[in-house]
Amino acid sequence: MTEFVQNKIRAMRHQQGDLADRSAAPAADAGGGAAHAFPSLAHSAAAPTAAATAAATAAATAARSSSQPPTTAAPDSDSNDSATTRRPRPFSNISVLRANAMKFLPNLFARGQLTRLFLAFPDPHFKARKHKARIVSATLASEYAYALAPGVGVVYTITDVEDLHVWMRGHFEGHASFARLSRSEEEADECVGVMRRATEEGRKVERHGGHKFVACFRRVEDPPWPGE
């Protein structure tokens, strides 16, 4: 845009120069009547110059505005207006990684690094020959115990398939590193409410009038080594 306006200015100045040369020749022959020789031409030559200057100024201003990031006034420290007051975001440590946790979980987390682990509406794999692909097994329960912090970590399970619920509950209850939370503890845990009502699958099951089965298990403290 700026280059286009500049080219227009050059063309108008060149045209003005040609008009000035043409008006100068008759004026010399008339003996000093240059000021009144071509008044209309002189007026038309001066007018485009002013318009071009204004256009160039506007274009330069627009170019500077587009090249600089917008600035906002600093919010008043006494103001409570949420539109002008910048507040810190509630979460700053969220990451998403699409991977096969059944294979690579120990490679992704250090021992005892996690405090919460959610198994929300996993694939039930109804066929018996596909049960080995379920996300809970004796081996995987040990890997979950490895990643969860002893005495603190909790694994949350929820499903709308009762058979899968019984399957997951049996594997965690039968593992030495996990203990089932009481019903009152589960109901008081806000994460359980989020799983039931805020997840996409949770809303879908609720719309269809289905049942949601929840079971939560705490990672127990490791027993002391012999001799400790």
Image (cartoon, rainbow, N blue to C red):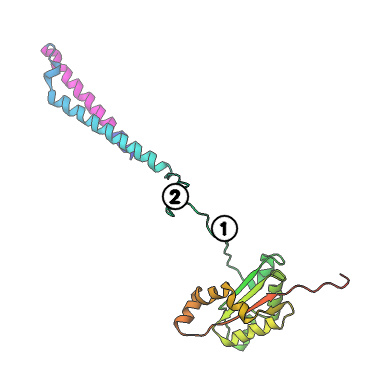
Q: In this view, does 224 lie above or below 133?
A: above
Judge whether residue 11 is colored magenta: yes
Q: Position of residue 207 (x, y in %)?
A: 44, 81
Q: Residue at 67% of width from left, 71% of height from top?
A: 153
Outermost residue, top side: 31
Q: Residue at 11% of width from left, 13% of height from top?
A: 30
Work out which quarter of the rendered image holds the C terminus and state it.
bottom right
Q: How crowded is mark 1: few (under 14 residues within 10 Å), some or many (20 or more)?
A: few
Work out which quarter of the rendered image holds the N terminus and state it.
top left
Q: Is residue 133 above or below residue 56?
A: below
Please state which of residues 145 and 35 is positioned toward the viewer in this rendering: 145
Q: Residue at 58% of width from left, 65% of height from top?
A: 97
50 on left or right of 73: left
Helix, strand or loop for the magenta stretch, by majority:
helix
Q: Which amino acid does label 1 sit on?
A: Ser
Residue that carries the numbered disc 2 in the rendered image = 79
225 on left or right of 51: right
33 on left or right of 115: left
Q: Give the range drawn in magenta.
A: 8-30
Residue that carries the numbered disc 1 in the rendered image = 92
Q: Residue at 12% of width from left, 13% of height from top?
A: 29
Outermost residue, right side: 227
Q: What element carries label 1?
A: loop
Q: Position of residue 173 (x, y in %)?
A: 69, 83
